[in-house]
Structures are given as C-alpha cells and as structure tokens.
Image: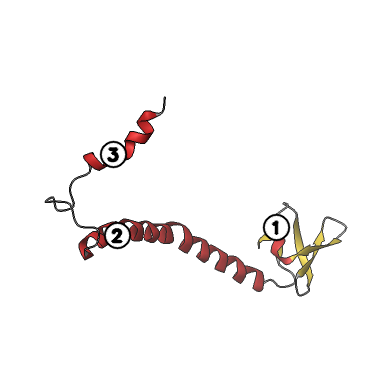
Amino acid sequence: MFEWIFKLPQAMAEAAPAAGAPGSPDPASPAGLISMFLPMVLIIGVFYFLMIRPQRKKDKKVKEMLANLKPGDRVCTIGGIYGTIKGLREDDVILSVGHSDTEIVFARWAIRNV
C-alpha cells in the first residue's frame, strides 16, 4: 500500500545530480555555504527592517510620551475615556473625567495619546 514511501529516498538519490556535476556547488565548499546561508541572512535582514525596527521606533515614541505626561494634559485612555490629568504617581495617573470632575486612577500604560 505505501511502497512508494519506501522508494522515495532511492528516487531522490537517483534524481539528485552528482556532487561533481558541473553547475552544482559542493556543499562543503565556501561557495556552497554562502549560497545556502545567503537567503536566510537576507530574510532576517528584511524582517528586521520591515518589522522589528519600526516596532522599536514606535515603542520608543510611546515610552517618551508616557514619560512626558504632566498635570493639565488632556489624554485618551485605551478604553476610550477622555480626561485631564490631575496628578501623577510612579505608575498611576489620576484623571479628572466628566462635568463633575470625577477622579479616576489609571495605570500609566493605559494612556493611548495626549
């Protein structure tokens, strides 16, 4: 039933070009190693420049914004609540919300934008 699975390695060995065939670099040679690792290095480079670097820039901007909060700033939280900063603690922000200036305590990281 599954005889073709057992014949697969033999068929692959027959289909593969010989190690000394022209046009196929020897995997042990420096040219063979470069041709194997170059695509991986390029993929890692693309991932860095398209995903990792922009995310780090964004994170740095957010940290800077949270560090520069001061009383009187009008902010929006991640929950969509708009308020004015009344006071700051180490990791907390006290917001004044609504017409009656109700004070609500939020974590500093919960501020989306100023």
Instruction: Judge by depth and name the residue closer to the eye, 41 or 24.
Output: 24
Determine which quarter of the picture holds residue 90. Answer: bottom right
Quadrant in which residue 2 is drawn: top left
- Choose the circle earlier in sequence order: 2 or 1: 2
Q: What residue type is labelled 3?
A: Gln
Q: Which quadrant, please, contains the C terminus?
A: bottom right
Left or right, residue 15 beside residue 110: left
Numbered mark located on residue 38 in the image = 2
Q: Residue 10 carries which label?
A: 3
Of residue 73 and residue 65, the one placed in the foreground of this image is 65
Crowd rating for badge 3 (residues with CA inside 10 Å; few <14, some 14–19, many 20+): few
Q: Position of residue 45 (x, y in %)?
A: 37, 61
Determine which residue is flagged by label 1: 76
Q: What residue type is labelled 2?
A: Leu
Q: What element carries label 2?
A: helix
Q: In terms of sequence position, does the residue under pointer 3 or pointer 2 come before the other?
A: 3
| Residue type at tag 1 | Cys
**Depth check, front residue: 5 or 65:** 5
Judge depth for marks 2 and 1 and give the one in front: 2
Q: Which residue: 39% across, 59% down?
A: 44
Mark 1 nearby-residue class (10 Å; few <14, some 14–19, many ≥20): some
Identify the element where label 1 is drawn. strand
Q: How far apart are marks 1 and 3 (CA)?
A: 65 Å
Q: Residue at x 70, y 57 (%)?
A: 76
Residue drawn at x 24%, y 62% as measured from the top left:
28
Locate residue 1, reporting x and y percent. 42, 24
